[in-house]
Image (cartoon, coloured by chain):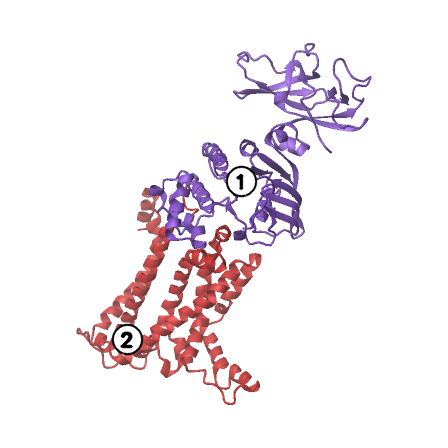
Amino acid sequence: MPASTPEQPAVEFRGVAKRYGSTPAVRDLSFTVGRGEFFSLLGPSGCGKTTTLRLLAGFETPDAGEIRLFGEAVNRRRPYERDLAMVFQSYALFPHLSVERNVAFGLEQRKRPAREIRDRVRAALELVRLDPGTFATRRPSELSGGQRQRVALARALVLEPRVLLLDEPLGALDLKLRKEMQVELKALNLQLGVTFIHVTHDQEEALAMSDRLAVMNQAEIAQVGTPAEIYENPRTAFVADFIGEANFLEGKAAGRPGGEAARGSLEGWVITGDAGSFVVPPHWAISEGGDVRIAVRPEWLDLWRPGCLPRGENGLPATIQDLVYLGETIHVRVTLANGRVMIIALRNEGQLIKPLPWNRGDSCIVAWRPEDCQVLEG
Amino acid sequence: MRRGILRWIARHPRSPGALLLGPGGLWLLAFFLLPILILLVYSVMPRGAYGGVQPGFTLEHYRRFLDPLYLGILRRTIWLSFLCTLACLLLAYPTAFYIARSGPRRNLFLFLAVLPFWTSSLVRTYAMIFLLRDSGLINRALMDAGLIQLPLRLLYTEGAVLAGLVYGALPFMILPIYASIEKLDPALLEAAEGLGARSWSRFTRVVWPLTAPGVAAGSLLVFVPSLGSFVVPDLLGGARQMMIGNLIQNQFGPSRNWPFGSAAAFAVMALVLVAMLGVLRMKGLDDEHGTSKGRGA
């Protein structure tokens, strides 16, 4: 492997496209993944995330664009010439081989000496916390789902790849096991310094594990960023809706920041819609008189009695529709003046003892600080 | 009687297994086990003057079967059946692989593979005579092309028998191999490639071991009927390429030596049994390997 300069990213996609027949599987993909990063490709099924991973692995060739690994173009390289390893969604363990032989497979193909193979297989099994003495001679059919997952991981890691690809690795596991494996995968990523690229449709999993993630929709990348950036500043309605829960509000920009339309102590754009008017901070690039759509997370919202709105907050009149007690939070659904339903997540900080402070049919004010909103594109 | 059965079903609502086996069991008892027993009894009785048997007990027929003349026929039978199995395997494996990976057209190909069964095997064997005889299509074409002056001797050779056997048996090899390749998870091949396996290595390390049960089943389905075939060697091999099936047929027909025919039939059956046990053991080993989708969540 020729030397690559340290500043070159582990993975780089430049305008990569792939179509199957007339349907584009991915369109104009451009993103980079830094060395040692845990990077997730997140999206609904059919969004192109698995195709992206397969393009990187070398099981598909791009129709256009360039894929670079550590600065080198790899478009034409076979999968085994790319210094990466993949964990398949179905694990794809060889059913006719023991755990030991499954893990040894790649090393045997590389014609390593028998002694080295034995030692490295043992080390890899220990790395994924499978006792070699117990599991080495078992066949995949004699393992549980979680154990198979670990074998698949060991089989990939034993090759000491520079990039590890994970295709929905936790999809087949039950919830508790999935949480455990999330922690373990993240720990392996930190411990080994290997770049992890992870495909999932589970937003919670992507947020919990990733350093950065790309949200994909309809063969394109909708947004790339850290979990916090994606959650707190979703650029489009799709991202806001796909990651977590979001309330949407629309209206027309009625005034300039700081202009005479500024209301009370609030500075910024005044947006007037059929549910009432509210203010968004002046830094947003909004054209006067244009349509504006904002997203507000349920936990950024608060509820007040009519007439009790604190200074400096936006408030819209509403009626309580129902309350869902979830333990950690209470989800309150309210109906705005225009009939739109919003969800407010009230944190259970101990004061929400019985009886709940709100009843169905109560009039209320839905409130949020102007800076706690996201103006959406398009 | 009928009410008895109904009452039994009523009492054992969860064990209809034995009943399901009933019709087939009765059929096998009447038309397989009973004739075989008769054959066994005949094989140890003295020969009757005009066919049939006389009362008595003798092992003479089995002893006679050990004559080099008959052992030669047995050897040729095994050799031809082996060659036939091998040829079928070499022809069927790539074909089955192609069919299994041909997407929506696979049903058409499968249909084509079994299409020869729509005509009688006798007709197909006669058709091969027209192809292979001195003035047949192949010789005519070769002579017209100026490649040969005199017709090649194709008919009544070991090769002709082999060609006939392979022709008839090929679908029995294609279908089980197709089934095993079709079950093969394509992700396994990608996994192998990702781990560094070149195409030959992917075949020997992954595809072949996982399709071996299909190969074993196909080999059994080809080898065993080949051992007993008599129409093909009779029509395409003539008197010189006699197989054990022809010998047995002769004993019950023109030679009128029923006990010797029975003894020869029993010898072949013992052979088949040994071959089957061998293959089943191979398959048994493979079944222990199980599949990755077998168990667990």
In the drawing, what numbered circle is on residue A196? 1
Residue A252 in which image quadrant: top right
Which chain is assigned red? B
Say what amino acid the circle numbered 1 marks. Answer: Phe
Question: Residue tagged by mark 2?
Answer: B261
Which chain is assigned purple? A
Mark 2 lies on a secondary structure that is helix
Image quarter where the C terminus of chain A lies is top right
Q: Do labels 2 and 1 share a chain?
A: no
Relative side of A47 to B128, left or right: right
Determine crowd level at label 1: few under 14, some 14-19, many 20+ residues with C-alpha closer than 10 A. many
Name the residue at 34% across, 55% down: B284
Residue A144 on image: x %, y %? 40, 40
Q: Is residue A316 above or below residue A117?
A: above
Q: Which of B276 and A347 is in front in this view?
A: A347
Name the residue at 55% across, 20% down: A329
Mark 1 lies on a secondary structure that is strand
The reply to whether residue A124 is in sight is: yes
Q: Nearer the viewer, residue B227 or B28?
A: B227
Q: Nearer the viewer, residue B2 or B199?
A: B199
Q: Is residue B8 above or below residue B45?
A: above
In the drawing, what numbered circle is on residue A53? none
Say if mark 2 contacts mark 1, CB within 8 Å: no
Residue B221 in which image quadrant: bottom left
Residue A281 on image: x %, y %? 73, 22
Relative side of A155 to B38, left or right: right
Chain at numbered mark 2: B
Q: Residue furthest bottom?
A: B149
